[in-house]
Amino acid sequence: MIVDAFLDGVLDTLRTLPFLFAAFLVIEAMEHYSNQYSNRALARVGKAGPFLGAALGCIPQCGFSVAAANLYSGGLITLGTLLAVFLSTSDEAVLILLAHPGSGRVIGSLLLWKVVIGMGMGWLADLLFRGKKEEKHIEEMCKSCGCSDTSGVFRPALLHTVRLGAYLLIFTFFLNLALELVGIRQLSRLLGKDTLFQPFLAALLGLIPNCASSVLITELYLAGGLGFGSAIAGLCAGAGVGVAVLFRSNRPMRENWRILALLYGSAVVSGMLLGG
C-alpha cells in the first residue's frame, strides 16, 4: 500500500513538472521585468489601492504579498490595500489546479471570489481604519522587498519548480496513503466537512507562512476532503511568506497581530458565506 501510494505520487508529480516549469518561467519574467513598476503603482494609487492590490495579488505567486508587507510597513500603502493583496494572493494553488484537466471553471471561480473578497474586505478596512503610518522613501522599501533583483528568470523558475514538485510529491504521497487507509468519506469527516468548523480549520492551516499550506489545501479540495467555501477560507488566509515579512519589518508588533486576526476573520467569514 505504501509503495503504491508513493508510486502514484511520483507519477502525479512528474506529469505536472513540465507545465509548472513553463508557468514559473512566465511568472518570473513578469516579476523580473515589471515588479518594480507594479510596486510603485501600488504605492501611489491612493484610494483605489484595495482594487489594484486584489487584482495584482491573484497572480499566482507570493511576491506581491512580500512587497505589500514592506510597502505597508513603510507607510506607502493603506491597511485595506495590504489586506486586499493578502486575501487575493493565490500562491501555487492556481498552478496545481491548472495541471488537472477540466479545472478551468474551478480556477475561474477561485480567482473571481478571491479578488471580490480582497476588494470588499480591503475597502471596508480602509473605511473603518483611516490611520496612516509614517511614510518612508519608496526606493528603500523596493530594495528591501527584492524587487530590484537581477538574477534572471531561468534559475528562479527551476528552483520554484523543484521546490513545488517536492511539496507535491510529499503531500500527494500522504494524501494517497490516507485515502487508502481511511477513505475519502472518513477523511472528509475528520476534516469537519459539511460542518461550521471546517472553514475555521482550513483558514488556520492557511495562515502557515509557507506555500506548502496552499499546496495541501488545494490537494485536499481536489480529493474532496474540503468544500469550496473551506478551500476559499484556507487560500484567502494563505498570504505566502508575506505575513512572515510583515512581522519582521512592521512595528509595533501588536499591530501585526491585529492584522493577522483581521486576515483570519475575513477568510473564515468568506468561507462560511460561500458554503463552508
Image (cartoon, rainbow, N blue to C red):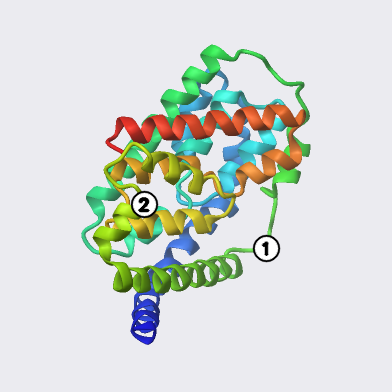
Say if 7 sits above or below 97 in the image: below
Q: Is mark 2 on a helix, strand or loop?
A: loop
Give the mark, 2 or 1, whose residue is nearer the N terminus.
1
Disc 1: which residue: 151
Disc 2: which residue: 191
Say if 131 sits above or below 259 in the image: above
Residue 135, x across and y down, in percent: 75, 23
**Disc nearest the viewer among 2 and 1:** 2
Residue 69, x across and y down, in percent: 65, 37
Residue 96 at least partly seen: yes
In-front residue for pair 157/10: 10
Residue 129, x across and y down, in percent: 59, 15
- Which residue occupies 28% across, 64% down? 100
Q: Residues within 10 Å of mark 1 (few under 14, many from 20)?
A: few
**The N terminus lies in quadrant:** bottom left
Q: Residues within 10 Å of mark 2 (few under 14, many from 20)?
A: some
- Which residue occupies 53% across, 38% down? 86
**The C terminus lies in quadrant:** top left
Residue 235 at least partly seen: no
Circles 2 and 1: CB atoms closer than 8 Å: no
- Which residue occupies 26% across, 49% down? 106
Q: Quadrant of residue 10?
A: bottom left
59 relative position to 154: left or right: left
Three-letter amino acid code at the position of disc 2: Leu
Residue 167, x across and y down, in percent: 50, 67
- The tag on residue 54 is none
Furthest residue toward bottom = 3
- Which residue occupies 28% across, 59% down? 186
Label 2, label 1: how many angstroms apart (C-alpha)? 42 Å
In-front residue for pair 190/235: 190
